[in-house]
Structure formats: C-alpha cells, structure tokens
C-alpha cells in the first residue's frame, strides 16, 4: 500500500517534489525534471530515475516543408528509450494527403516509421497512438550520443497538423 503525501517542498528553491511512502521505500516525483526517483532504504541509494520527454510539432510554428524538422527536444547520450506515444491534437494534412511522416531519435524511423498520412491505420489522425518502443527490451532504443527528436516529412509538404511525441527513458552508462 502506498501513502501519498500532499506536502510539496523546495530543494534549494528550484525543484518541487512530492514524496510517496510505500512498502518498497520512498519515491519522489520531481516536477521540474519530470523524474520519478525511488529510494530503497535497504540499499541506501536511489534505485533509478525514469524521465519523460515531450517533443511537439505544430504546423503554425514549425511549418511543413519536406525534410527534417527539429522538434528541439533533446534525448541525452546513453538514454534508453523504453516506451513512446504520439498524441495527435490536429490531424496532419497535405495537398493530396500523400505526405509521409516519420519520427527519429537515434536512427531513421526508430520512433515512428515513415507512413503516408492517408494510409489506413496511420498514426497521424487525431488521437493517441503507440510508437515503436512499447515498453519491451526488444523494442528499446539505446542512444549513442545526445540527439534531438526529429520529424521527417517526405513526398509532399504538410499543410496543417499538431502532435506531441512522448518518450519514456532512463539514462545509463
């Protein structure tokens, strides 16, 4: 059973954290860094930190030209991307809906493979969709350098759309 505290406190005046005490130790959610950290009293060390990176594409801000579009969110060197999702707020469109869109971090098509926005089952219609890393070691991606989340548009320029890419990762060595 976990007991959630309603107490928030500042560490050095910069980071708000909320403690949660359970049978397996104490957890802190660091809202500034987006990290969940667990302290296991028997080991006397932090057990780990998962981080959630959110990268946003918005046609009104980023345009829709063919090529790579930097979503400016960085994933650190040695991060292992464990899970991913795409939250499409506004369905993507292009002149004839022939545009293809892919999302990459480490290598081409590693988060979302290129697929036409008109294709049945494409992840570019409004709603929440799974990316390629889906919470399994087999689908996880290990970063070999710091990288920026990038959308790759091909075939035809986009004319509208907005989405968020969520990446859950942990940094190792």
Image (tube, helix red, strand yellow):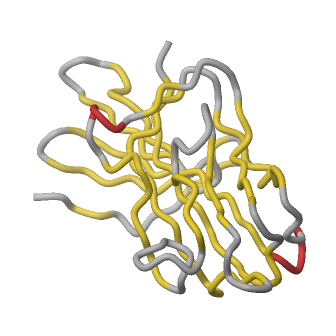
Residue at the far top: name it. 173
Which quadrant would the N terminus be assigned to in this image? bottom left
Please name the residue shown 30% across and 46% down the image: 135
Is 84 on the left-hand or right-hand side of 164?
A: left
Of residue 50 and residue 20, the one placed in the foreground of this image is 50
> In the figure, is residue 118 to the left or right of 161?
left
Q: Residue at x 69, y 46 (%)?
A: 149
Q: Position of residue 68 (x, y in %)?
A: 81, 50
Task: Give 53 or 32, whichever is nearer the viewer.
Answer: 53
Query: Camera-side residue: 60 or 152?
Result: 152
Q: Could you tell whether 55 is left or right of 95 in the image?
A: left
- On screen, residue 30 versus residue 5, left or right, reads right
Q: Quadrant of residue 7?
A: bottom left
Q: Is residue 154 above or below residue 73?
A: below
Q: Position of residue 118 (x, y in %)?
A: 56, 80
- At x 47%, y 19%, the residue is 172
Residue 16, image x, y percentages: 60, 55
Number of callouts in the render? Answer: 0
User: At 34% from the left edge and 38% from the top edge, which residue is drawn?
Assistant: 139
- Horizontal and vertical percent for residue 85? 46, 62
């Amino acid at each position: 059973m976990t007991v959630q505290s309603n107490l928030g406190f500042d560490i050095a005046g910069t980071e708000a954290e909320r403690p949660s005490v359970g049978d397996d130790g104490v957890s802190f959610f660091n809202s500034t860094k987006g990290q969940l950290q667990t302290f296991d009293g028997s080991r006397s060390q932090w057990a780990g930190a998962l981080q959630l990176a959110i990268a946003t594409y918005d046609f009104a801000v980023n345009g829709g030209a063919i090529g790579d579009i930097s979503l400016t969110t960085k994933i650190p060197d040695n991060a292992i991307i464990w899970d991913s999702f795409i939250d499409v707020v506004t369905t993507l469109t292009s002149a004839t809906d022939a545009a293809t869109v892919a999302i990459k971090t480490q290598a081409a098509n590693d988060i979302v493979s290129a697929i036409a926005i008109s294709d049945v089952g494409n992840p570019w219609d409004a709603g929440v969709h799974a990316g390629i890393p889906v919470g399994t070691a087999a689908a996880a991606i290990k970063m070999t350098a710091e990288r920026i989340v990038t959308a790759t548009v091909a075939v035809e320029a986009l004319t509208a759309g907005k989405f968020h890419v969520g990446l859950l990762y942990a940094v190792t060595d």
